Image (cartoon, rainbow, N blue to C red):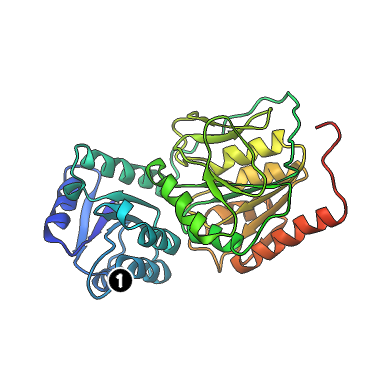
Amino acid sequence: MKIAIVNDVAMAAEALRRVVASTQEHQVLWIARTGLEAVRMCLDQRPDLILMDLNMPEMDGVEATRQIMEQSPCAILVVTGRPQDNVNQVFRALGAGALDVTATPVLQGQAGGDSELLAKIKTIGKLIRHSTEAAPPRVANGGERSEGQVQTLVAIGASTGGPSAVAKVLSGWTPPPGCAIVVVQHIDETFASHFAKWLDDQLAMPVRVIGEGDELVAGSVQIAKTNDHLLLDQNYRLRYDAAPRDYVYRPSVDVFFHCVAQHWRGDAVGILLTGMGRDGGDGLLAMRRAGKTTIAQDQASSAVYGMPRAAAELDAAQQILPLDKIGASLRNRIGAKLNNGWEPSPNL
C-alpha cells in the first residue's frame, strides 16, 4: 500500500516512516507536518492509507480527517501518543471517518509498538481489498427461554464514522420498558471500554460493555467489547466466539445480526450505519427475512457508504434513511408496538 504520514513531531514521523519502510509490501508516499498540509497533499497524491496524528498546528487531525474524507476520501488510521488520554479527540476523529486508532510506536513506552501498528495496517489493507472475507458462522437452532423483561431488541451495527452516528441515533432518548439495545461497533478491544464511557457521557441511558454470558438488559445500551464476534445464543445469552478467525471485520455485525434472526423470537429492529466494507448487509437481510424491522443509513449522511450500500444492494433494508431521521423512525416503530399492546409470543 501507498502510505502517507501526518505528524508534526520529527521523531514520531521518522519512527512511523521506519516501521512502514521495514516491510516490502508498503511504501511511504509522502509526509506532512500539519493537518492543512495533509489535506492539500492528499488532493495531489491520494494514498491508500494515512497515519494521522491528532494534535498539530494550523489544523488538527480531527479537522484534517473530516476534510480529507469530504474532498479525497481514503483509509485513515489515527496514530497518536497515548490515545487513552485523548478520548474525546479520538472519537471525534472516528466520527469524521477514521477507521481505527493506535499509539505512536516511539511514544508508546513498551515493546510491541511496531508489530501492533503493522497489524493494524495489515487489517486495513484487507478491508480495502475485500480479499479475506469469510461467511459468518452459523448458529445452531434450538432451546427456548423466557426473555424476562426484554420484549424488543434493537441491534445496531457500525464501523467507520460509527461512534458519532450511534450517539446521534440514540441521543436524547429514554427507551420504553422492555427495550434492550446492543451495539456492535468495529473498534479494537483496547479502546472498547473508552467507547462505552464516551457514549455513556452522550446519552440519557446507561451504557455498559458486554461480558461473556451476560443477559440482555432493558433500558440500557450494551456494547461489544472484544475483537471476537458477539453472539446471541439460543438461551438469549450474549457470548463471544473467535471463529471465523480470518474474518476481517471484528467484531462482526453480520455474525450478531444472524444470531438475532435465528434466535430472537420477539420484536427486533436492525440498524446498519456508516462503515467501510460489506459487513452487516447479509445479516440485515437475514433479519428482514425473519420478519424483523430493518433500517440502513443513506449515502449522503454516511461517512463511508460501504456497509449501508451492501444492505441496499441486497434489498436488506426496509427503510434507507438519513442519519437524522433514523432515531425518529426507531422511536415511532417501538412506540407503535407498545401502543398496540404488542406482547412477546407465549411460547417464549
42 relative position to 137: left or right: left
Whether 193 is drawn above or below 41: the answer is above
* Residue 178 drawn at (x, y percent): 73, 46
Depth check: 110 or 114 in front?
Answer: 110
* Residue 124 drawn at (x, y percent): 37, 47
* Residue 199 drawn at (x, y percent): 50, 55
Depth check: 316 or 171 in front?
Answer: 171
Does the rendering let one see residue 246?
yes
For the C terminus, the image quarter is top right
Label 1, on which residue?
39
Residue at 84 percent of width and 44 percent of height: 343
Q: Quadrant of residue 339?
A: bottom right
In the structure shown, which secondary structural element does the residue marked by tag 1 occupy?
Answer: helix
Q: Quadrant of residue 76?
A: bottom left
Residue at 23 percent of width and 51 percent of height: 104
177 relative position to 283: left or right: right
119 relative position to 184: left or right: left
* Residue 301 drawn at (x, y percent): 55, 67
Residue at 53 percent of width and 45 percent of height: 208
Whether 177 is drawn above or below 232: the answer is below
